[in-house]
Every structure is written in C-alpha cells, then in structure tokens.
Amino acid sequence: MVINKVFLDQLEYKVTGACIEINRILGPGLLESVYKKCLMRELQLQNINFTAEHPIVLSYKDVLLNTELKVDLVIENCLVIELKAVERILPIHEAQILTYMKLLKIPKGLLINFNSTNIVHNGKKSFVNEFMYDINP
C-alpha cells in the first residue's frame, strides 16, 4: 500500500462516512466507548486495518517512559482518530490529537465528536502536521 495524499484523503472520507452512519443510527448522547465499539465494527465491515487503544511510547531525554498513553484508533498506520462525546470540542482536545500525531509521527488526524447532530458540519475536525510534507502527492 502506498501512502500518499490521495490515499489519506480517501481514508478520511471512508472514516467520516462510517462516523456519519453511526451517528445516523444511534444519534448523540451515548458514551464515547459505545461509539468507539461501533466505529471499530464499521471499520471491520469495510476491511480497513486499525489498532484500538494504540499505545504511545514516549521518549523523554533519551529514556523510554511508561506513560500508558493510548490513542483511540490508528487507522492503516497513517491516520490518528480521537473520539469524543462531549458538549463541544475544547482547545485541549485539539492539542491532544496534535500531540498524539507528533509522538506517533503520523501525518493526519481526525477529532470526532459524536455528541453532534451533524458529524461533517460540527462534529469533525481534521488535522495535518509536518509529517504530511514527507508524503508524496
């Protein structure tokens, strides 16, 4: 599999579609853990590879630290997904996903808030970082 910007955009489109389907069926108001399980099932149905509760190894001043950091989902080793079921996305949520992306050296991330009536318009934020520049167009 070649990871390029087109592949990442298509992957984001598929994941967004899966989130829309979940939100259409369940609606807002449930726990984040419920939406995560549903998204995992949707990804399985679409044969999209992912890891859930993906551990983040933190190296600090040349020492690996057991911080027990975990990101909700890493999809195809190139897209970080952080799920929320909150009233609104806060700057700390955005900082969290950007830091996860940096630590994992992953170029793209999606912050999905299932406590939303419309995932595309007010329930999803897409992020890229400096690792995106290393990806072919």
Image: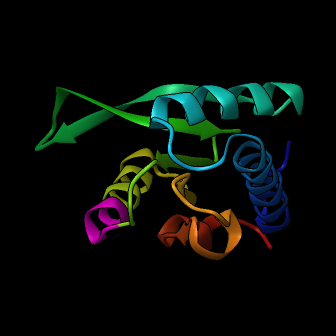
Which part of the image, by quadrant, shows the C terminus? bottom right
Number of marks in picture? 0
What is the image's colouring?
rainbow
Instruction: Depth check: give the residue in front, 44 or 118.
Output: 118
Query: Within the magenta stretch, is there residue 105?
Result: no
User: In the image, residue 40 lies at what x, y percent?
Assistant: 68, 28
Quarter of the view holding residue 97? bottom left
Q: Nearer the viewer, residue 68 or 46?
A: 46
Q: Closest to the observer: 2 or 97?
A: 97
Q: Residue, x 79% and y 32% (percent of image)?
A: 42
Image position of 90 (left or right of 120): left
Quarter holding residue 134: bottom right
Q: Main secondary structure of the magenta part?
A: helix
Residue plotted at (58% across, 36% down)? 35
x, y (%) of residue 33? 48, 29
Answer left or right for 36 relative to 13: left
| The image quarter in which residue 121 lies | bottom right
User: As drawn, is 111 to the left or to the right of 15?
Assistant: left
The magenta segment is: 90-95
Compared to residue 36, the image places residue 109 above or below, namely below
75 versus 34 height, above or below = below
- Return the x and y of residue 87 as percentages of the image width and height: 38, 61
Quarter holding the N terminus?
top right
Picture residue at 46% right of the left edge, 26% below the top:
53
* Residue 12 coordinates in the image, percent (x, y): 74, 58
Could you tell me which residue is drawn at 89 percent across and 33 percent down?
46
